[in-house]
Amino acid sequence: MANKGIIFDLDGTLWDSSEQVVKSWNEVLSRRPETDLQITVKDMQGYMGKTLEKIAELMMPDIPYELRMDIMKDCCENENRYLLSHGGKLFPQLENVLARLSEKYKLFIVSNCQSGYIEVFLEYHKLEKYFADTECPGGSGLEKAGNIRLVSERNGLEKAVYIGDTQGDCDSAEEAGVTFIHAAYGFGTIDHKVPEVHSLTEIEAAVRPFLDE
């Protein structure tokens, strides 16, 4: 197989875990005396795709940095445990699409998440076999553009596209020098014209001009 790769964002692109993550974070927030904050699914969908540091700043702007990052660490640890038991909501036809794509291309995940989050997604939904590599800031210390480059380089990709749903995904792909395709069924919008798909089943046709021609 030629080294052609599709690199996926996770939240808003492969699944929606916002309802489950909200439940797990609110469990933590309810027992932390430093805040009376409770978040909603709408809040969470606005946070997804951002770094944990940025989410903590948006959620808890009045709490000192070190304390809010400690609360965030607590939230993320509880989130991983909760998702390992409950999973998330996969977008329609996900496994069928991954099975087809993996016959022609190497598949990857790069997400702005904590260590263990991608692994929980793969383990709970039994999707490990479709992906050659994954990366996140919690593993590499890099933000998304750096992780897209890292995954591309260490897997020797000759051609690659990045599929994500937010402006941050688009900016990161462009910074990394990788073609971006917008998962328009996800949580975000893009401020300029880019290739887009409206369902997972459109991906195979959408990547063909960039990977096969």
Image: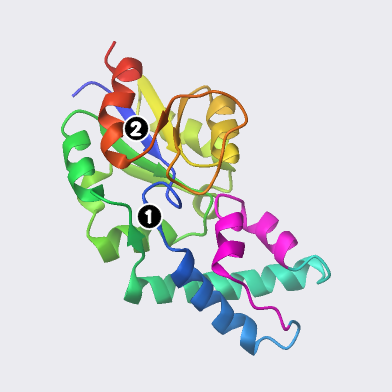
Task: Give above or below for 176 relative to 16.
Answer: above
Closer mark to the observer between disc 2 and disc 1 = 1
Q: Nearer the viewer, residue 58 or 129?
A: 58
N-terminal label among 2 and 1: 2
Residue found 40% across the figure and 32% down from its top: 154
Coloring scheme of the render?
Answer: rainbow
Task: Give above or below for 53 relative to 72.
Answer: above
Which quarter of the figure has residue 121?
Answer: bottom left
12 displayed left or right of 189: left
Q: Amino acid at mark 2?
A: Ile
Residue 51 belongs to the span the image colors magenta = yes
| Spatial separation of the CA atoms under disc 2 and disc 1 | 16 Å
Q: Nearer the viewer, residue 30 or 123?
A: 30
Label 2 crowding class (10 Å Cα cut-off): few <14, some 14-19, many 20+? many
Start and end of the magenta stretch? 36-59
In what element is the residue under mark 1?
A: strand
Determine which residue is flagged by label 1: 15
Which part of the image, by quadrant, shows the N terminus? top left
Which quarter of the figure has residue 133?
Answer: top left
